[in-house]
Amino acid sequence: MKKEELFYALGDIDPGIVKEAKDYKKHGNMRWTRYIAAVACAAILFGALVNIPTLRKDRVEDVPNPAVSEVISVKAQYPKITERETGFEDVEYNGPMEWMRPLERNNDTASANKSTVEGGYTALMKELLASGDENTVCSPLNIYIALSMLSEITDGNTRAQILAALKANDIESLRKNVSALWQSNYANDPSFTCLLANSLWLNSDVKYNEKTLKRLAGDYFISSFAGTPGSEDFDKALREWTDENTGGLLSEYTKNMSIKPGTVLELLSTIYYKAQWVHDFSPDLTKKESFHGVSGDSSVEMMHKTEVTNIYKAKNFSSVGLSLYESGSMYFFLPNEGRDLNALLSDPEVMKAIRFDEADKNNIRAEVAMSVPKFKVSSKSDLMDSLKALGIRDALDPSLADFTPLTTEKKGLYLSKADHAALLEIDEKGVTGAAYTELAITEGAPVSDRKESFVLDRPFMFMVTGRDGSVLFSGIVRKI
């Protein structure tokens, strides 16, 4: 197939773009093959994106002239946001209004899949939140969506391990779960914002599977970028896109983001969240008090309020949920005296508490006097060991990983990077949070003819790792 014919086969591409590219080839100032691939990748995603049934008013960005831009992009169109004519506080509630009905239907769909999704959430939290003395934070939903995208570009046992980690029976049910999560959570309102975004970062020298890219674009609302991994333009575009979609809250982590040379593809998923309490904390009641942390006491700004609400009294903890405008609630879990905080990560009562069953005898209606510290917690984690512990192993091994749905051009592909960063902050008004998950697919290093020697005839260090990568022993041999 000629290069010109390839453009038309990929979607409704403006013939002028093809002519510009064709004419530009004659000048010989840039590598023709790279930009044909870049525009082709963008064209694939353009053709998929324009067929999404429920879209915002935003139009897909036109593919720029390859002679002008190093990074070629196609911007995703996101689920249509149901708008309302009045503010929540101005409405007398007499049953669901028209603008609420689509939201309720989406919530019902999401609730029907909740049990399977919660299994994935629980597994992720258990791996990421357990820590000795450090604060930890993660976005289970964000990681769930990122790993779902990873499953779309894998096959065989590699995909099966990802599905098992996410507690999904098959790829079709996982797609339904992700669709429901998007439709029920995506929102942009003065009192509640929950913006989800995904992106593909494509190596313009690689030929990709058109069907897989269309699937990702259609089901995951992906923006696509094609360029040269390792170039400053590509890294800058990556950082700017991530900052834009996380409200700039994670800039301390994004400032060092980069796509290494030789990367075949990167998947990036983000979430930005901002919600107001239904009942604010009065700033007048906030005062300095002691917080008894694991490293000793500290002075913090403690917020106070009293309201009639439900408190969940379980064997190992007590829990209170504070309602958020048009969102869900923020739940706080306080372990009972003598109980291990990390043990709550495996306690099935935790999920029961957030489901809120009035018939549950542990739910007690009471006037609750609350003292809640203002706090801001953020962290960045390398997910590799956590993925191994969840059973996702083949994707990390170039000799076992199956990325054939992504491309058959490259061999020995594997997941070379899995980073997650998150932030959450609360004050008297409400909750703000952001997170991203970055997954990189790289080609395994080829066998080298280079020869080296390794002679342990002077002091050395050692480590012994277990089957899951844990360091079982380590030491330094200074004399024998």
Image: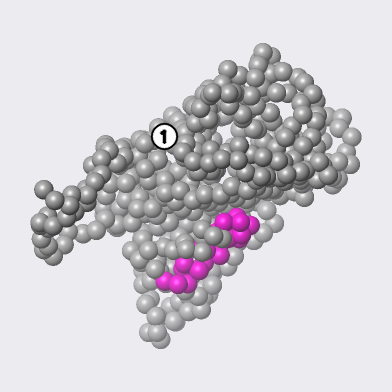
Predominant SS along the magenta part: helix
Between residue 159 and residue 365, name the one nearer to us: 365
Q: Evaluate whether residue 428 shows in this view.
A: yes
In this view, 386 is above or below 56:
above
Q: Evaluate whether residue 217 shows in this view.
A: no
> What's the residue at 54%, 35% (across, down)?
177
Say which amino acid is labelled 1. Answer: Ala
Q: How many marks?
A: 1
Q: Is residue 233 magenta?
A: yes
In this view, 254 is above or below 420:
below
Quadrant, the N terminus? bottom left
In the image, taking residue 355 as reference, residue 450 lies left or right, namely left
Which span of residues is magenta-colored? 231-250
**Could you classify mark 1 by the number of other residues whose Cα lies within 10 Å: few (under 14), some (14-19), or many (20 or more)?**
many
Q: Position of residue 400 (x, y in %)?
A: 26, 44
> What's the residue at 49%, 38% (across, down)?
129
> What's the residue at 44%, 51% (across, down)?
419
In this view, 118 is above or below 273:
above
Residue denoted by label 1? 165
Q: Position of residue 249 (x, y in %)?
A: 61, 56
